[in-house]
Image (tube, rainbow, N blue to C red):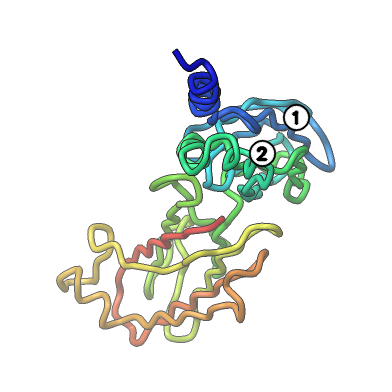
């Protein structure tokens, strides 16, 4: 038996069987801190799952080529949110020598050849006035005439939310609705906290809760004009969209606008 021929083959077998963890491993301990104060409750999400940690603290996450989406909440502060990019680990090039294309391929599938920044610092939002509830969303919708805040609800994965705002057209009496007429417009601003950027912001009329006086509900669209003002750079952080709702005539009605928002 030729032992000299067997030994390299066995060595190669060991290298191939262990190539997924030769250099990096498939998990990473990430240290999370919040500013200006600690004690925030944070969630970390990527394509492999969601992990939770209180600041200052560390949590073990599964590495992948997708970014790590992090949101932190602290009583008395608006939420903080960042996206920690996934980096390709150059050191896993050693797997090409030890395991060839197979080694690198296994690392790519397992996530072993990626890593996240460590430690990670999440800036919390603005300090809230006493008694003002904090929102779980780093975006907000505020309308004038009178002042109304759109209620945000989650409608998908992290970074997706929708706000609903009701408008009273040529009548008043509902304290939770924006009152508009031909001489008084309603203006809504969709704003992101500093560090948060919009991917898209749109609006749609909710036919189920919109109506006109003595006319079919879909006729409401004939009596209002909605104008949208986009920021110069929608992908910059801390931007704001503006929607102006105008009454074209004196027809009475109710209008509910929904604002689907995508952010990161």
Residue 128 image offset from top left, x and y in percent: 74, 46
At horizontal 43% and vertical 45% (from top left) the residue drawn is 157
**Residue farthest to the right?**
36
Q: Residue 204: give x, y in percent of width and height.
A: 34, 67
Q: Check whether the beta carbons of the residues at disc 2 and disc 1 lie within 8 A of each other.
A: yes
Label of residue 55 in the image: 1
Element marked by disc 2? strand
Measuring from the top left, give residue 73's x and y in whole percent.
66, 37
Q: In which quarter of the image is residue 202?
A: bottom left
* Residue wearing tag 2: 72
The residue nearer to you, when weighing 128 against 210, is: 128
Nearest the camera: 48 or 217? 48
> Of residues 181 and 64, which is closer to you in this image?
64
Where 126 falls versus 239 (above or below)? above
How many labels sit on residues?
2
Residue 10, horizontal then vertical, whole percent: 50, 20
The residue located at (27%, 64%) in the rendering is 210
User: Could you say which quadrant of the image residue 145 lies in?
Assistant: bottom right
Query: Tag 1's secondary structure?
Result: loop
Sequence-earlier tag: 2 or 1? 1
């Amino acid at each position: 038996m030729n032992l000299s021929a067997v030994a390299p083959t066995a060595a190669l077998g060991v290298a191939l069987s262990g190539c997924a963890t030769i250099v990096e491993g498939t998990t990473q301990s990430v240290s999370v801190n919040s500013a200006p104060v600690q004690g925030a409750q944070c969630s970390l999400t990527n394509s492999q799952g969601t992990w939770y940690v209180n600041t200052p603290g560390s949590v073990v996450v599964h590495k992948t080529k997708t970014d790590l989406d992090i949101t932190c909440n602290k009583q008395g502060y608006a939420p903080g949110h960042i996206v920690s990019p996934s980096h390709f680990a150059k050191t896993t090039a050693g797997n090409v020598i030890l395991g060839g294309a197979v080694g690198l391929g296994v690392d790519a599938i397992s996530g072993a050849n990626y890593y996240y920044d460590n430690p990670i610092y999440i800036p919390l939002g603005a300090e809230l006035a006493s008694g003002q509830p904090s929102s779980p969303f780093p975006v907000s919708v505020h309308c004038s005439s009178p002042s109304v805040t759109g209620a945000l609800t989650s409608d998908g994965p992290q970074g997706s939310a929708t706000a609903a705002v009701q408008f009273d057209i040529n009548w008043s009496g509902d304290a939770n609705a924006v009152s508009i007429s031909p001489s008084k417009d309603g203006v809504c601003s969709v704003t992101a906290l500093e560090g948060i950027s919009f991917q898209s912001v749109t609006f749609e009329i909710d036919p189920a809760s919109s109506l006109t006086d003595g006319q079919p509900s879909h006729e409401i669209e004939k009596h209002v004009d909605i104008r949208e003002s986009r920021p110069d750079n929608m992908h910059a952080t801390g931007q704001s969209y503006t929607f102006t709702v105008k009454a074209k005539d004196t027809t009475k009605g109710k209008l509910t606008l929904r604002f689907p928002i995508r952010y990161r």
